[in-house]
Amino acid sequence: MNGSIKIIEISGIPIKLHFTLIIMIALIAWTIGANLEIFAELLGVDVVILPGFQSYALGTIMASGLFFSVFVHEMAHSIVAQKMGIKVKEISLWILGGIANMEEIPKDPDSEIKMSVVGPLASLGIGIVSFAIGLVSPPLLSLVLIYLGVLNLILAGFNLIPAFPMDGGRILRAFFAKREDYVSATQKAAAIGKGFAIIMAVIGIFYNIFLVIIAIFIFLGAGQEAFRTSQEAEGERIKKLLMNVKAEKVMSKPVETVSPEMTVAEFLEDAMDIQHTGFPVVENGKVIGIVTMEDTKKLNEGQDLEKKEIREIMEKDVIYFGPGDTLDEILEKMEEKDVGRFPIINEREELVGIITRSDVMRSFKRMTDITSLKQRIKKGDEISLKSD
Ligand code: ZN
């Protein structure tokens, strides 16, 4: 998360604090410190507290205890995730509690339930133990422990609210995912979460403005989760379709090439004629580089285009693919390297074609059309063939 600083690393997991958490701790410490007498009375602890420094020190201890409880909650998620073989990238603590940032979220509903439920269970455990010890401790310690006990019980309850990004939202999604696909399960859970956020905000307007702020975070979190999941599913769908297509089926050939001795002025002339934006540079039958219109834009003003050779401005670090490579890996590489075209060379290292992003997209579009047409035929829908 942006705005986080790493404080320690435990079992390979960096633990980070988000600046909003620090605001939260200070706010809680101050609130507790200023109202300690009332808190003690509310919690039923009979204790005499000196106003001023002692009460704010206690407030800080209690707020830090809360932060530590949240951390244990996230650690519980992370340990179960690690046991499932999922890498935990970091644990971030912020205004709404904590986030354990996992490399992936288990798609299997039972695993997601298991991983989600241990967090609230950990909070419930700390809550009960802390409360129980608090009951038999001396007054000041008793106040701290009973307070933390109650907060942990609230934490467990809060995290079970069936809305993303809370654990309850994930449990709800997993519950739906047992019967339907992951994306629609997420959308359903996100919609319910948004509903909760709206109800919470309305209640907050009348009772506590803080609830409204939390509701906004919940509302945004629900939307984000739904968006992320559908993007991921779309990515997987594209990959699956492209996996079946070989480069030789969609590559452009023959390829317009240029020689490294060609001047930039000549190149621009040619490019204008052919209307391509990128060309392999070939010398003695081998591709030694690729030159694009972008490369010519990098030239400084006042340079003599009649003297400058293509060899000097071309991209020498060329990535190749073979005719038998599939479009999914080609597209992945295009995105990774932010490159729009790759030369296709055969086993004798001869240039046999070039594949561009638009070749891949055109092929994808064709396949999507065919797939949806097939599905409609399967469903027995009536297809009217119109000529346009
Ligand atoms: Zn949790």
Image: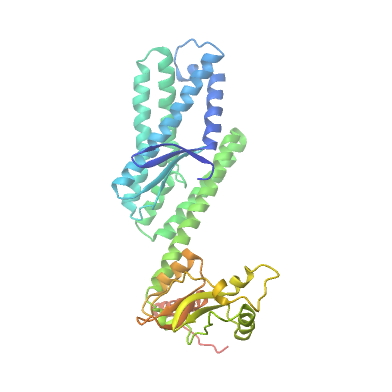
Q: Nearer the viewer, residue 268 or 68?
A: 268
232 over 216 or under it: above or below: below
Let me know if residue 351 appears in the view: yes
269 over 188 or under it: above or below: below
Residue 56 placement (x, y as % from top left):
53, 19
Q: Relative to 257, is 237 on the left or the right?
A: left
134 over 265 or under it: above or below: above
Q: Nearer the viewer, residue 44 or 246?
A: 246
Identify the residue at the far left of this view: 83
Q: Nearer the viewer, residue 110 or 265?
A: 265
The quarter of the picture showing ligand 1: top left
Let me know if residue 98 appears in the view: no
Identify the residue at the far front of this view: 307
Image coloring type:
rainbow
Residue 63 placement (x, y as % from top left):
48, 26
Report the number of numbered marks. 0
Identify the residue at the far right of this view: 302
Quadrant for residue 251, please give it: bottom left
Residue at 63% in and 70% down: 297
Residue 158 placement (x, y as % from top left):
45, 37
Residue at 58% in and 88% down: 388
Residue 91 placement (x, y as % from top left):
42, 41
Quadrant for residue 115, please give it: top left
